[in-house]
Each structure stands twice: as C-alpha cells, then as structure tokens.
Amino acid sequence: MTKYLISFPSGVMDVPDGGLQEVADAAHAVVQEAKEAGVWVFGGGIDESVPPVMVSGDGAVREGTYPQTAQIEGGYTILELPTYDAALHWASKIATACRCAQEVRAFQYDPAS
C-alpha cells in the first residue's frame, strides 16, 4: 500500500463567521472514519505561531526555511491506501469537511518505513 499526503494551505479555507466549530466537527468525523477504515497514519495542522528553523548536521540552529518551503502551513493528512483512486476519494471527503480543495501527493515506496 502507498502512503498519500493530502493537504491544504490554511488561507484557502472558506469558513463563514462562527462556522469554525462546524468545520472542526466535520473534519474530526472524517478522521474517525479513516481510523475506523484502518487507513489513518497521521494528520494535523501546522502551528503557525511556532516559527520554522533550520538545523544543520552539527546541530547548529538558525531561523528560516528553504526558500521553496517558506509558505508551508495549513492542514496535513497521511493515509495508507491501496490505490491512487482511493486517495482521491478520501481527499474529496477531506475537501468537503474542510471547505477547500485538497492537494494529493504519493510518497515513494520505502521498505524500511
């Protein structure tokens, strides 16, 4: 089975005023469904209040990111699924719950992980 990353940036959610709890409840229902289906690996939102840092091989820490990842934020879900079509199906469920389109990417197979 392949692990898929299903994600969205936080700024694209279309949540009406006072509707955040409804979105959270819908998202939690999809999470529960994925867990019950046995496809859930991990999910969560990036805590945007914690700034990203870079850590080198010698342990040195500096502020910042790689330029191409400076805008990583939002919600992320990893599911382990039998087919790409299954990933698209689950992405549609997440899109409905979160009120925004989802990006789907497949992880390369690694027998050690």
Image: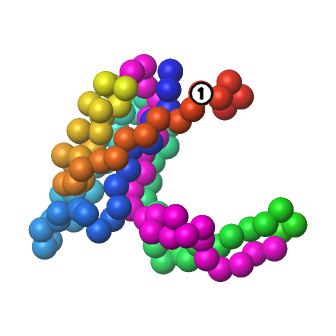
Residue 89 image position (x, y, % from top left):
26, 30
Residue 100 seen anywhere in this rendered image of the structure:
yes
Q: Nearer the viewer, residue 17 or 4?
A: 4
The quadrant holding residue 84 is: top left
Secondary structure under the numbered disc 1 in the rendered image: loop
Please say if 61 is above or below 98.
below
Up the image or down, 58 lies above or below 61; here it is above
Query: Which quadrant of the structure image shows residue 44?
Result: bottom left
At a point 46% along the width and 64% down the height, the residue shown is 72
Please state if 51 lies on the left or on the right of 54 as rendered.
left
**Quadrant location of the C terminus?**
top right
Is 28 contained in the magenta span?
no
Q: Which amino acid is tagged 1?
A: Tyr
Give the image location of residue 111, x and y in percent: 68, 24
Position of 39 compared to 19: left or right? Answer: right
**In the image, 57: left or right of 44?**
right
Residue at 24% x, 50% y: name it. 101
- Pointer 1 residue: 109
Q: Residue placed farthest to the right in the image?
A: 58
The reply to whether residue 26 is visible in this rendering is no
Where's residue 102, x and y in %? Answer: 30, 48
Colour mode of the rendering:
rainbow
* Part of the protein shown in magenta: 60-83
| Residue drawn at the location 60% of the way across and 67% of the way down | 66
Residue drawn 83% across and 62% down? 57
Q: In terms of image quadrants, where is residue 52?
A: bottom right
Is 75 included in the stretch rendered in magenta?
A: yes
Instruction: Please tell me whether residue 40 is drawn above or below residue 12 in the rendered image.
Output: above
Label 1 crowd (10 A; few <14 / some 14-19 / many >=20): few
- Locate residue 99, reporting x and y percent: 19, 54
